[in-house]
Image (spheres, rainbow, N blue to C red):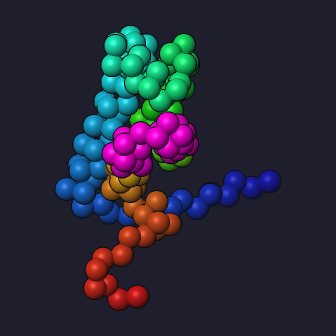
Amino acid sequence: MSDTAIPSQPVLAIPKPQLWTGRVLTVLVILFLLFDVAGKFMLPPQVTEASVRIGVPVHLNPLFGAILPACTIVYAIPRTALLGAVLLTGYLGGAVAIQLRAGTPLFETLFPVIFGVFVWAAILLRDPHLRQHFPVRRVGAAS
């Protein structure tokens, strides 16, 4: 057998402002998620009341608090960030389903969707290879 090099992906340049915007957004997403994890373990009255209001047994909060940091860590590691985004999308989808079932106000129901947009925007800003698969066309750009 001969050693054959596996072709690597070409290096695509990312404008620095775009790269830093993606990095800052990633850090903000991670910090928010870790703040949410802390609430699930410390169970302040607001978290307990919200759990009861949406029909989630309070004793499940630590389980959610264990799943979320696992997904967040996978998202925080650059090599596994795409997998982390997929896992977080599933987690946030579950949150939307619970909110819809509980009949919560529109913003509370849509917040996980809005947050998911930030999760994906952060990766798309940092990863030009991913943008090749999920292109966002500019207004007025040729088709």
Name the residue at the right extreme: 1
Residue 20's x, y, as percent?
23, 49
In the image: residue 101, left or right of residue 41: right
Q: How many marks?
A: 0
Residue 49's x, y, as percent?
39, 19
User: Who's the residue at 80% across and 53% down the image?
Assistant: 1
Q: Which residues are magenta?
A: 88-116
Residue 111's x, y, as percent?
36, 44
User: Who's the residue at 24% across and 61% down the image?
Assistant: 15
Q: Is residue 13 magenta?
A: no
For the residue pair 77 and 52, the one nearer the viewer reads as 52
Q: Picture quarter containing residue 97?
A: top right
Q: Picture quarter containing residue 27?
A: top left
In the image: residue 98, left or right of residue 19: right
Give the main secondary structure of the magenta stretch: helix
Question: Where is 42 relative to 15, above or below?
Answer: above
Name the residue at the left extreme: 17
Q: Is residue 80 visible in the rendered structure shown here?
A: no
For the residue pair 116 and 44, the one nearer the viewer reads as 44
Question: Where is 3 relative to 132, above or below?
Answer: above
Q: Quadrant of the C terminus?
A: bottom left
User: Who's the residue at 19% across and 56% down the image?
Assistant: 17
Residue 126's x, y, as percent?
35, 53
User: Who's the residue at 28% across and 85% down the image?
Assistant: 140
Q: Is residue 49 visible in the rendered structure shown here?
A: yes
In the image: residue 6, left or right of residue 131: right
Q: Is residue 100 magenta?
A: yes
Question: Where is 25 relative to 43, above or below?
Answer: below
